[in-house]
Image (spheres, coloured by chain):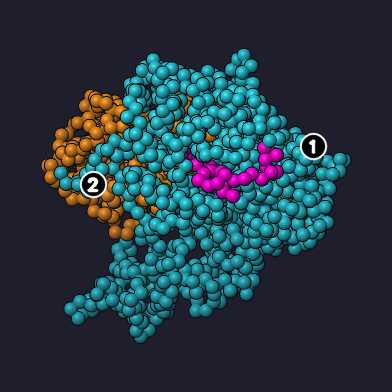
Amino acid sequence: MMAQPVPHQAAEKKRVKVYELRNNDWFDRGTGFCIAAFVQIEEGQPKEPRVIVESEDQPDRLLLETKIVKDDGFQKQQDTLIVWTDNGVDMALSFQEAEGCALIWKFIDGVQQTFQSVIGGPDDGLSDDIAIDMSPAIQLPSADLAALSELESNIRIMGSTANGRNALAKAIMADNYISRLIPLVEMAEDLESLDDLHRLCNIMKNILMLNDTSIIEHAVSDDCVLGVVGALEYDPDFPSHKANHRQWLNSQGRYKEVVRIEEEHIRRKIHQTYRLQYLKDVVLARILDDPTFSVLNSLIFFNQVEIVQHLQENDGFVNDLFSIFADPAEEQLRKKEAVLFIQQCCAIAKNLQPPQRQDLYNNFLSHGLLQVINFGLRNFDVTVRVGATDILVSMIDHDPGMIRHTIYRQIQEKQPPLTDTLIDLLLVEVDLGIKSQISDALKVLLDPTPPGGPPEARGEFVGQPRGRPQPTMDPQQELFLTNFYEHSAARLFKPLLDLEKRPDLNFNVLNDGIFGYLNDILCFYIRSHQHRSKFFVLTHNIAQRFNRLLSCKEKHLQLVAIRFFRQLVVLQDEFYIKHIAEKQILGPVLDVLLRTMPRDNLLSSACLDLFTLISKDNHKDLIKHLVENYREKVMALSYIDIFREILHRYDQSLGFNASVEPYFLEDEEEVGRRPAHPSGRGGMMEHLSIDPAQEEYWNTSDDEDENHARAPDHNSSTNGSTTSKPLVEYNSDEEADDNADAAMAPGSSSLQDEHSKENQAPTTSNISATTPPPERLSEKRRREEDEDDALEKLVHHKRRNSSSSVSSVGSTNSAASLRKKKGFSGNRDSSPTGGPKKIAISISSIKAAPVKSPQPVAGEDTT
Amino acid sequence: MSDLDKAIAQLRACRPIPEAQVRELCHKARELLIEEGNVVTVTAPVTICGDIHGQFHDLMELFRVGGDVPDTNYLFMGDFVDRGFYSLESFLLLLCLKVRYPDRMTLIRGNHESRQITTVYGFYDECLRKYGSANVWRYCCDVFDYLALGAIVLGASNNLSPSSVGEPSSSESQSASEEEIEIEVCNADGAIMSQFPRQVRSSNSINTRPPRGGSSPNGASEAAMAAANTNGIGSESGSGGGVGAPGNTGPPGSGASGSSGGSVGNPAGAVLCVHGGLSPLIDMVDKIRLLDRKQEVPHEGAMCDLLWSDPDEIDGWGLSPRGAGFLFGADIVKVFNHRNDLSLIARAHQLVMEGFKEMFDASIVTVWSAPNYCYRCGNVAALLELSEDDGGLGIFSRSNGDVNRSDGGMPGGNLIGGGQGRGVVMESDLAEPKSGPARRYRVFQAAPQDSRGMPAKKPVADYFL
């Protein structure tokens, strides 16, 4: 691993005398054996070409070790002499034989000629010694066991230079050399010659790592593949192991053919693609370098595209495929496999160009894909349900509008809409994966943002309302939503609503996860459905339901409730603030904190986070509510900063009207600071300016609970100027960043958003001028550079990573992953500050207090 | 043998446990982790480890070098998964050990313990391959959300306890016995490769900054290389080779001297362990406790920074090339350590060829525990051992582990305005950084290749297309 031993085979050493020019006199440094090789000098560095002479008398002593550098002026003189300048000292090697000299010279010359490409080229991670028996032309030795060692070194030498690799690749293809090597594997196995097998493995590795597309394609062809992987079973790095690649690839029945594919070449392509994946994941996994990795990936990609394209253009095939589901007599197994087949098609489709993908889905839909999904979702076999969910999610991922449109039609035709199927499944499903994907799907399908518009903010930061005109909702979507809230919402949130009637709060470990999902979904709806969700929360007394969870013994369920309340606070919506106060929610949360507090655990952190939010954002109503209703509890907790702060704020705001002004100012500051809030998640502030749809809704809806219902409007008009106004205007950058972050995928930022960004630009700059540095956190996003784990790399990887379904990522940011997003690129372009910027942040100025702003002791480590 | 012990045995053999068992394990772990604060308090002795990255066989080597659980207390600083081919087995084993020996294992979260990152860097794919569905990945991701964000080690000694693993080479320990050893570097067999005594220095002896980049190759790397160097080019092999006699060099990586403020035997300050580094939003350790950590790692904010930031030779804060977190300089670390009565920050997150690297006058150290990272980087790995103080000197006089420790005695120490008392850092304070605990680094290499099968991913079993 460190410096590698140099090859020691006596045959490769050339006897030589080493001379050094001292005072114009050639000084004899001794006689020894010369080798020229690539040697690993430092970890992580590319190997260096070196000329080494080992002493004849004391083999451990080196007479010479010199690096071959481009302008060292190596020269060959006469037949047996090589001279050069080593760090200003003239050196000479005098060979005993001309042949030896020629070989060393060949190496030196080769290195110097291709110097750039060797140094800049990737370290192929292969074994290290380069023997010097380089044959004059690309004439590979005959393929037999006796010549293996010669072949091995030839290939290594040539593989070390770009020219050599090209020539080698050509020669291998021209001579059909792989096919000629293959019989040797069995021959060596028969002879039980492990050395030969190891050599064959090395040779095969080197050949594959030449990164030549045609070689790799040839290697996975029917004729060659078993021989090739056979050779690779004997890895000299693991001398005591033998892999079983041949057995794996040879075993029948890995390939499932649901509907016969008539075209021979397509079938062959399918097998080859599988072998390529096997090569990538198993055979070469450990030694793959980036170039080979991408060659394999692109071969796989193009094959898959070709296969899927071919199949979907083949009408007969698609008909046969979908008719499997139409036939009631068909076996379950075949139907299952058909679902899995479609699932795989859809997974591949993710890599297609959007128009082609659209064609594929349209084609499938017209053949009855939705019935297939319906069939799959209700299937007793969990694999089928997983498959159907995957298919659905990949379509939603592609274009949720497509599915919404279908659901709309279902509603029109008085069929049970797909959403109901999903809801039913969500509530009873035991498979966690299906559950979380459905939960994501329910969010995206009910996202009211019109197609093409910017997706609803991922709900990340407080105080970033959509500074754009309220999008007029698509009537279809409108109807869809109305229908949902009339018929389905109560069904979806039934477990939550049932909490009221539940005598006990003992939950089953298997299904108590549902509350987490429901909370996720509900928080999303609250952020995006405005008046509808408000009405729902109000009429079903949702807050109280969550409150009930606070008294159950499972801490993770208590956390769910706290999370919901946090969302309500984060929205900064007067309606919800009032709701929190009215429903007396904070009392029980204080109780949880009091119960937990001596201990420092997740629960207390979550509670403290909630109260920090209330205090920091200066929710005056909530502070007032807290202190006036729970003064004792707050006092009991006042040994914690936050609660002292809350009391302090309450005291300040009492009776001092004059203090309104400073508070207002502070508000603005807070607003600016908010993106930098430690745990800046949560919701998007719905802006409170009057929304026509909302207005109309409240005007036309029945009068039930009229007083409460009208509250938000009332507040927004009277009170909106204090807290919400500045919020509305502060938008642009962070929101965009935020979207991009959550999204993590490329795309184009929408026109609307650009527009709003333009509008907001002046405001933003004002704010940033008055606020301390931390706000500029977002600038870090604009940095172009990227490193190892850099987040931005995700963008590229996601694209490349075909099989890992992006859409199934997680639940927290899950909605984000299901939809189209803007990428970093969009943000970068719109940002004038491209380069890296240093931020000087004084630690102590993080909070509003005007602590000294210069760096505390920047750069003073003198004492 | 309980089910848990069986699961441990099975995982130690690098065989995954069934999905139902994973679910049960994750539920148990969740109950346990929910009781942990965002910053876990750990008392010495403890062995601190950096990134593992699914290199299961190297994790086994780590346990061999550092001592097995439960005989040794471990603190893993995140990044258990991704990159290597055995993320699943590695993480589940660590989780099993956590559930089995909750007080002896501490796991904190790394930036790879996240849904987004694992989908890209391998863990997701691995679960999918090994179980045919992503459910196990989901269970694990749920556990990730509950992992603590950091840890504080208390009660670390200023003196090294005798090495418990292997035999220290006698000559080295003889020569150093007169002085108090602050740093000791051992190889995988426990032989001492180098020692650095605690240095008493006058108040103006460290007015040079550590030279940038001059820290590598540093003492540690030379020692490690020398020990690993068996081919005889230019150096003797064997233990203790390499770096010169004690006293010649400062602590590895610091390029400067040790730092005890002149008083030998002060109680060692606390050690903060976190995966990435500091955050401009966190000036007090206690502020970490206010975060609601149960969530996917956000893309900015304090929680993100703790998991993503890196120390760098800059002044103040800088933008991170990683696209998340920040770079922070020596001044930031020193102010933070002073303010929080820390003597050292231990973190992981960055590959160090030598396995560990101390920076900024030994105020922060990077520990890396994945040897030959990605099966090809050629680096060595390291563990950091902090020993228990038994002389009574190192008993912590501070309450780092308690909530609100940092505003003790601070009048009006509320979040706004009150912080000034602490916020002012006198120059004289900085002149005497907290005396660092005695640190023993064990450097080790990748598990011998023969001890494992050929690393590979599990192939897809069936295919339609």
Q: Position of residue B360 (x, y in %)?
A: 26, 46
Q: Give the SS element for disc 1.
A: loop
Can the viewer see residue B80? no
Instruction: Say if the magenta span includes residue A474.
Output: yes
Identify the residue shown where x is 54% and y is 66%: A210
Q: Position of residue A66 (x, y in %)?
A: 32, 69
Is A234 placed above or below A445 here? below
Q: Which mark is residue A414?
A: 1
Q: Amino acid at mark 1?
A: Lys
Query: Which segment did they paint magenta?
Result: A453-481
Q: Position of residue A806 (x, y in %)?
A: 59, 47
Q: Amino acid at mark 2?
A: Ala
Colour in which chain B is shown? orange
Q: Which of the 4 image quadrants contains residue A690? A: top right
Can the viewer see residue A796? yes
- Viewer-nearest residue: B27 or A205: B27
Q: Earlier in the sequence, mark 2 or mark 1?
A: 1
Is A576 placed above or below A173 here? above
Q: Give the SS element for disc 2.
A: loop
